[in-house]
Image (cartoon, grey):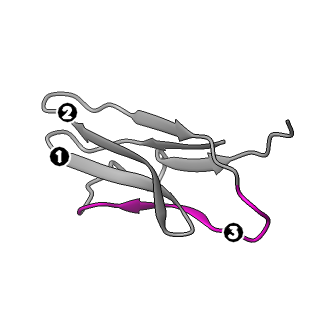
Amino acid sequence: MFTVQYCPNTASNVCIEITHEGKHLQRSFHFERDTAVCVSMQVFAKVAMGEKVSVRPIRSVDFYHSEADAWSSFAGFLMHL
């Protein structure tokens, strides 16, 4: 399972996707006009050792960030079934 949390700046469009070996797995689009929020998305994928899973912008992004805080994140964990 892979999960992303991102925090767009107020009045900005953000469109990102999670990819596996360059192929689209999940997309997220968000626009918040009045307040700052954080958004998350998750995806389950069968991934072999050494394969690459990443997050990339579909268009330019405008994330909230500051020197003291790390608001956006990307994580994954292995599940044995």
In this rendered view, identify the residue nearer to me: 54 or 8. 54
Q: Which residues are magenta?
A: 47-59
Identity of the residue drawn at 45% across and 35% down: 40
Q: Callout 2: few (<14), some (14-19), or many (20+) C-alpha neighbours within 10 Å? A: some
Residue 66 appears in the picture as rendered: no
Q: Quadrant of residue 54?
A: bottom right
Looking at the rendered structure, the secondary structure element under dot 1 is loop
Left or right position of 41 against 12: right
Identify the amino acid type marked 2: Glu
Q: Which residue is mark 3?
A: 51
Q: Which residue is mark 2?
A: 32
Residue 14 appears in the picture as rendered: yes
Q: Position of residue 30 (x, y in %)?
A: 26, 39
Q: Main secondary structure of the magenta part?
A: loop
Identity of the residue drawn at 57% across and 68% down: 21
Q: Quadrant of residue 35?
A: top left
